[in-house]
Amino acid sequence: MENVIVIKMGGSTLGSHDTTLEDIVALQKQGKSLVVIHGGGKVITDWLTRQGIQTKFVRGERVTDKASLEVVTAVLAGLTNKELVAALNNLGGRAIGVSGVDGALIQAKMPDAEKGYVGEVVKVNTELLETLLGAWFVPVISPVSLYAFDRPSDAPLLLNVNADLIAGDIAAALKAEKLIFLTDVAGVNDKSGKTLEKLSAAEAEKLIASGTASGGMIPKIKACLKALETVPLARIIDGREPHALLKEVKGQDGGTTIYSE
C-alpha cells in the first residue's frame, strides 16, 4: 500500500472538456496506485428540485432529511458514481465504483441533529481499498456512508458525509503519498486574493480561524489537516486547467501546498 495517491474530484471541475479522467487512466497505466473520491452537490440539487424537495443549508452544509437522503444516495452512489466509472473504463482504465457503505469502508455518526442525516467519519476500514488496489483497480468512492455509531433503531442505515472530509480521512488511513484536491479555484488565497504557494498546518488553521478561508474551502483545508497526520503533504490545485492532474503528479508548480511542520 505504498505510494498511494488520493484524489478528490470536485464536481464543478468536471465538464465536457475536462481531462481529469484521461489523466487518471494515464497515471494508472504508468503504474500509479490511485484512490478517487467524488461528490456531486450540483447534481443532487438538480434532482431534489425535480422531486420538489427544497434544499436547505446550515453553515454551508446541506440539511439532509429522509427524503433528501434517498435522493443523495441515488445520485451519488448510483448515477454519478457509475457515470464516472463507466467513463474511466471506456477510456481503457480499470475502475470499480463503491460507496462508503461497501465493505463498511466509511463508518460514521450523526453529530448534529440540525443538519439531519449528515455524518462525521469515525472510522475508515481500508480492507476493501487494499483488495482493490492490490488487484490494480482504481476505487472510485461516493461519500454515502454507513451509520455505524450511536444510531437510533428507527434511523436510516446511511449518512451523507462531506466528500472533502472523507478524502482526508481516507488519505490518513492509507498513509498516502499525497492528497490532491482538484477545485475550481487556483488554490488557497490570502485576504488580498493572492494564491498562497505554501502553508504550514498551523498557518492553514489560522486561515480558517480568521475567516480568510470560507465556504467550500474550509472542509478542504480541514481534510488536508486530517491527512497530514500520516501524509507528508496535501495539494489544492485548479482542476480546470488542461491535464492538471497529470502535471501535478509530474511536479508542476501552481496551487497551494499544505505541509506538516
Image (tube, grey):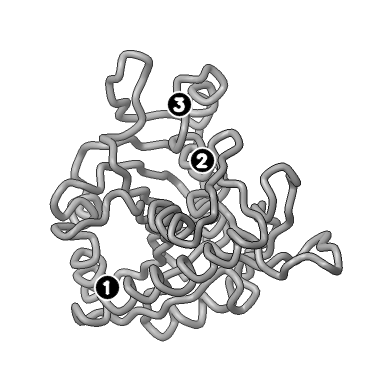
Q: Is residue 73 left or right of residue 188?
A: right
Against 207, residue 245 (above or below) is below
Count every numbered label the image shows and give the total. Answer: 3
For the residue labelled by badge 2, is the local secondary structure a helix, a strand or a loop?
Answer: helix
Measured Cα–Cα span from mark 2 to mark 1: 27 Å
Against 20, residue 99 (above or below) is below
**Going 45% across and 20% down the picture, which residue do you hit?**
212
Looking at the picture, which amino acid does disc 1 mark? Gln
Q: Is residue 243 visible?
A: yes
The mark found on residue 213 in the picture is: 3
Residue 75, position as x, y percentages in the image: 46, 67
Q: Quadrant of residue 27?
A: bottom left
For the residue labelled by badge 3, is the local secondary structure a helix, a strand or a loop?
Answer: loop
Against 105, residue 227 (above or below) is above
Q: Nearer the viewer, residue 113 or 124?
A: 113
**Going 53% across and 65% down the picture, which residue do you hit?**
71
Residue at numbered disc 1:
28
The mark found on residue 219 in the picture is: 2
Looking at the picture, which amino acid does disc 2 mark? Pro
Residue 80, position as x, y percentages in the image: 39, 68
Q: Quadrant of residue 156?
A: bottom right
Label 1 crowd (10 A; few <14 / some 14-19 / many >=20): some
Q: Is residue 177 visible?
A: no
Q: Is residue 37 left or right of residue 54?
A: left
Residue 18, position as x, y percentages in the image: 18, 57
Task: Mark 1 vs mark 3: give the one in front.
Answer: 3
Q: Nearer the viewer, residue 55 or 147?
A: 55
